[in-house]
Amino acid sequence: MTPQKKHISRRNIQYDWLAKTIAEYDSDECLLWPFHTDRNGYGRVRPPLKEYGRITFGAHRLAFKFKYGHWPEHLGTHSCDTPGCINPKHIKDGTNASNQKEKADRARSVRGTDQKGAKLTDEIVRNIKREYKPRKMGFHRLANKYGVTKPIIRSIIRGILWKHVQ
């Protein structure tokens, strides 16, 4: 009788690699996830079925758990601004709101004309802010004039969108 070969799945290889690497890694440099990443560049890993079921985790969050013994609160945000980094020293607790604020503070947010499909420019937004007059040239008229929706105009006037344009 020949011994059966143990099936080694891709998920086990990635999980085992991550556990071993995090246990041995002690540098302050970024450690990049070498396997599958999502469209935003974050490493994705599916641990063995028996431990977690069919859930896929961010590799950075699982690295944090391996290093510190607990999951990061909320997202687990990167202090290095590198989505593919799995160095637990670069991961900290954080909410989506705090992460978005950090992105904006570090000028990493896509804004204005850099956004895909942007209809407005900085100059047009300045015109909208200048032309806005309640009950005379309001949200509805400006939206029609510039080919956008009333909520967009309202958000520009209230300083929610296009904040960087004065």
Image: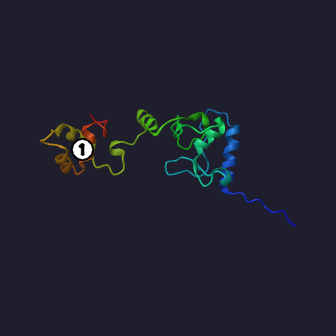
- Residue 98, given in percent of the width and then of the height, sits at 45, 35
Residue situated in front as seen by the camera: 63 or 108: 63
Q: Quadrant of the rendered structure where residue 129 is? A: top left
Picture layout, residue 127 above or below residue 53: above
Residue 147 horizontal side relative to residue 56, left or right: left
- Residue 159, given in percent of the width and then of the height, sits at 28, 36
| Residue matched to label 1 | 153
Q: Quadrant of the rendered structure where residue 165 is? A: top left
- Disc 1 crowd rating (10 Å Cα; few below 14, some 14-19, many 20+) is many
Quarter in which the C terminus is drawn: top left
Quarter in which the N terminus is drawn: bottom right
At 67% across and 40% down in the image, what residue appears? 22
At 25% across and 50% down in the image, what residue appears? 149
The residue type indicated by label 1 comes to: Ile
Residue situated in front as seen by the camera: 49 or 37: 49
Residue situated in front as seen by the camera: 108 or 57: 57
Residue 18 horizontal side relative to residue 108, left or right: right
